[in-house]
């Protein structure tokens, strides 16, 4: 019974934080999955009191994680366009917005 209550509380925390992220940036609600994933990703990279002010990632990989690439949700981003996909006069990057982080790369 206690575990179910704990899991339900964690889910409410994730949904509440995601709702706040969407409202703060005036985003449509169909981006709720990306907001939830972003919140969980950032929470895994945040220091935890139970772990002695270490992050979950730090405990798992046993070294201090690099967090310099973490940006604000929905901030302006630029994506590189490879040379083979553009001509000489086309732009080398395209604008976008950050709606989440990749699980396989920092790009």
Image (cartoon, helix red, strand yellow):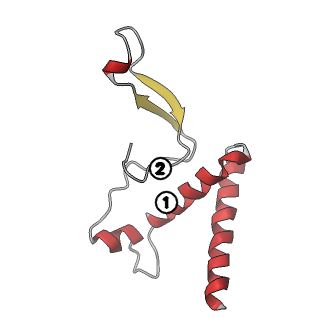
Q: Using the image, tell me which numbered label, if any, was put on residue 101.
A: 2
Image quadrant containing the N terminus: bottom right
Asked whether, in this view, residue 12 is left or right of residue 87, the answer is right
Q: Secondary structure at mark 2?
A: loop
Observer able to see residue 55: no
Asked whether, in this view, residue 101 is left or right of residue 64, the answer is right
Residue sitting at x 66%, y 52%? 32
Q: Using the image, tell me which numbered label, if any, was put on residue 68.
A: none
Is 8 or 52 nearer to us in this picture?
A: 8
Residue sitting at x 54%, y 55%? 38
Where does residue 59 sit, x and y in percent of width and height?
34, 74
Callout 1 touching callout 2 (CB < 8 Å):
yes
Q: Is residue 34 above or below residue 53?
A: above
Q: Quadrant of residue 45?
A: bottom left
Observer able to see residue 1: yes
Q: Using the image, tell me which numbered label, if any, was put on residue 41.
A: 1
Where does residue 42 sit, x and y in percent of width and height?
49, 60
Residue extending farthest to the bottom is 1
Is 95 or 33 nearer to us in this picture?
A: 33
Image quadrant containing the C terminus: top left
State the separation of the CA atoms marked 1 and 2: 8 Å
Where does residue 41 sit, x and y in percent of width and height?
49, 60
Residue sitting at x 62%, y 53%? 33
Could you tell which of marks 1 and 2 lies nearer the N-terminus? Answer: 1
Q: Quadrant of residue 12?
A: bottom right
Q: Quadrant of residue 54?
A: bottom left
């Amino acid at each position: 019974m206690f575990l179910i209550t704990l899991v339900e509380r964690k889910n409410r925390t994730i949904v509440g934080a995601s709702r706040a992220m969407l409202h703060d940036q005036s985003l449509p609600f169909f981006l709720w999955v990306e907001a939830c994933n972003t919140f969980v990703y950032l929470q895994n990279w945040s220091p935890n009191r139970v772990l002695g002010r270490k992050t979950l990632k730090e405990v798992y990989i046993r070294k201090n994680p690099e967090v310099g690439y973490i940006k604000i949700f929905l901030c302006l981003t630029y994506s590189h366009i490879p040379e083979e996909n553009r001509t000489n006069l086309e732009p080398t990057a395209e604008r976008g917005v950050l709606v989440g982080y990749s699980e396989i790369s920092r790009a």
